[in-house]
Amino acid sequence: MVTAGLAVLAGIAGLLLALAVLWPLRARGRAGFLVACLSIGLASASLYLLVGDPRAAQEPAAPSLAELRDGVQALEQALEREPQRADGWVLLGRSRGELGQLDAAAAAYSRAAALAPDDAGVLVEAAQARAQADPEKHFDDRALGWLQHALQVQPDAERAAWLLGIALRQRGRDAEAVAVWSALLPRLQPGAAAALQQQLVIARAAAGAKAPAASSGALQENATPLLSIGIALPPGFDPAQWPQGAALFVLARAPGGPPMPVAVRRYPLQALPASVTLSDADSPMPTQPLSSHAQVEVLARLSRTGTASHAEGDLESAPVTVQLPQRSELKLQLR
């Protein structure tokens, strides 16, 4: 019934179109004019009945899970015929990942990486898939090797650098992670750079705030102390009452700016210093060294968790704003 009605509408539309197009010819003969118009209208209706389908105007429905699985099966069959197609294995890996089949996705990406060992994009996806398949989301040695090689063949591969930093931090190689991320930072957009800066601060702190050799060239040129800070502990302070992982952070940040420090030092509970110096070598962001600031806000925090983030139970000094370079020693009292 619906199809017949639409056929009538198609015929009417054809008739109206014929009237508009053939109207100038009516003077040559009314009978011929009417026959031509009716013929076009009937032809339109007949053509619709032959090939028309009202469902063609509807948006296609999203494929079902069964259809996705059928597509994966068809792709696997195609790869059996052409197993040397690296792009096919990449597509299979993505499809398996979308189906939540992480082990199968990692296996497919491994095949792609073997076929395209110098394709940075493939290596990065393979490494990430391998980590996602791991219960602890750990980048194993093979994934680490893929990421390192991806940066060798494409030094500006941002995703490779980001994931490599994570893989290095998982191994406790924080100084190396800082070197990789410090090289990446200037190339990022502001939003991504801000997120990476926070991770750099944490990585630098975990590395003991020592600038790695691979990234310290420019900073070492101005390693002269710009700040000398004396740290006073509360009266009766007993280290035995604190967790073994506690740590002291001494940091400088831009007054009124973001919370990320422009210089930071970290000391374990077992080696709390009486005084600390800060220089460009302690800057977690090479693009914003301590010496680039005329004024900084300085504070010290004894963290119970050993992380740079403030937590309940920490001891902290009041922040003090000073001019750089600071000529005399600044005194900070932990409370």
Image (spheres, helix red, strand yellow):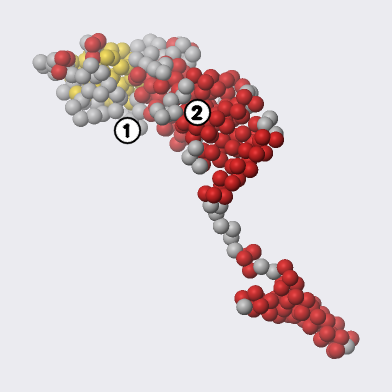
Q: Position of residue 220 (x, y in %)?
A: 44, 11
Residue 243 shows in the view: yes
Name the side, left or right, on which 1 lies relative to 48: left
Residue furthest right as drawn: 28
Q: Position of residue 254 (x, y in %)?
A: 34, 28
Comparing labels 2 and 1, the label whose residue is closer to the camera: 2
Q: Residues within 10 Å of mark 2 (few under 14, many from 20)?
A: many
The residue where tag 2 is placed is 130
Residue type at the position of mark 1: Gly
Packing grade of label 1 (10 A; few <14, some 14-19, many >=20) is few
Up-down relation of residue 54 to residue 101 (above or below): below
- Cα distance in 3D space between marks 2 and 1: 42 Å
User: Looking at the image, is mark 2 or mark 1 earlier in the sequence?
Assistant: 2
| Helix, strand or loop for disc 2 | helix
What residue is shown with label 1?
A: 256
* Front-most of residues 78 and 233: 78
Residue 136 pos. (x, y %): 40, 28
Q: Nearer the viewer, residue 4 or 198?
A: 4
Q: Which image quadrant is residue 21 in?
A: bottom right
Q: Residue furthest left?
A: 236
The amino acid sitting under disc 2 is Arg
Q: Can residue 14 be seen here?
A: no
User: Can you say which quadrant of the picture contains the C terminus?
Assistant: top left
- Considering the image in quadrants, where does the N terminus appear? bottom right
Q: Residue at x 53, y 34 (%)?
A: 105
Residue 175 found in image quarter: top left
* Residue 29 lies in quadrant: bottom right
As drawn, the residue found furthest toward the bottom would be 30
Question: Residue at point 10% right, 15% down?
Answer: 236
Q: Give percent across and percent down for residue 197.
A: 41, 28
Q: At 44% across and 13% down in the image, what residue appears?
A: 212
Left or right: residue 203 versus residue 50 is left
